[in-house]
Image (spheres, rainbow, N blue to C red):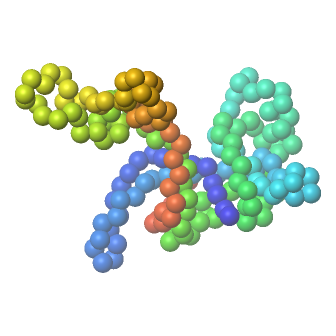
Amino acid sequence: MKGIIGKKIGMTSIFAADGKQTACTIIEAAPNTVTQIKTQETDGYSAVQLGLGDKKEKHSTKAELNHYAKAQTAAKKFVKEFRNYSIEKNLGETVTVEIFTEGDSVEVVGTTKGKGFQGVVKRHGFSGVGEASHGQHDRSRAPGSIGGSSYPARVFKGMRMAGRMGGDRVKMKGLKVVKIFPEKN
C-alpha cells in the first residue's frame, strides 16, 4: 500500500480523448515527511508514519518535539500512519505525489462539510407528513410519529430525527488518479 496526506483545494472537470467529461477533485499533496517507521520486530506490525505541514515549536509538547527530533524534522500539524507501506523510505525522507501514476485506483479518506443542525427532510430525506390541506398546520417538514404510546412507551434507539449533519469521516474506494502535477505540489 502507498499513501500520502493531502488537502482538497477545489473541483474541476477534465475532458477525455473521446469527449467525455469527468468531474475531478483537486488535491494539494505537499511533500510528506517520514516521521516514524514501525517494524514487525519492534512494534508488532509494519507501518510508516507521515507528517505534513510544520507546526510552531511553542504549540508542541516535549514528547512531540523528541519524536520529531529522531527524524530530524520540525513538528508536524497533520500526522497519519499507513500500514504495510510498499515504498522503502528512511526516517526524515520526503514522499511526493510521484509515487502515484495516472490511472491508479486509490482510496480517499476525508471529512464531509458540516451542515449544522438540520431537520429530517434534509438530513434523512423524509418527505414530510401527508397533505398540505385538510387542516394540516406546520407539518410539511415534520418527522411524523416516532413511536407507540403505552407500548413500547419509549423511543427506539436509532430513530432518525433532526440533529447535527455533516462533519463525518467518509472513505471513498475505487477512485482513479486522472492527472498528476508534481511541479505544483
Residue 58, x across and y down, in percent? 73, 23
Q: Residue at x 43, y 34 (%)?
A: 159
Q: Is residue 1 left or right of residue 45?
A: left
- Residue at image position (81%, 32%) is 65
Residue farthest left in this picture: 134
Q: In this rendering, is residue 98 above or below 146?
A: below
- Rendered residue at 9%/23% (across/down): 135
Residue nearer the viewer, 149 or 111:
149
Q: Position of residue 14 (x, y in %)?
A: 35, 64
Q: Quadrant of residue 152?
A: top left
Q: Is residue 52 left or right of residue 106?
A: right
Looking at the image, can residue 94 be seen?
no
Closest to the observer: 161 or 175? 161
**Residue 41 horizontal/vertical position (percent):** 92, 57
Question: Farthest right residue?
Answer: 41
The quarter of the picture where the N terminus appears is bottom right
In this rendering, would 121 be left or right of 115?
left
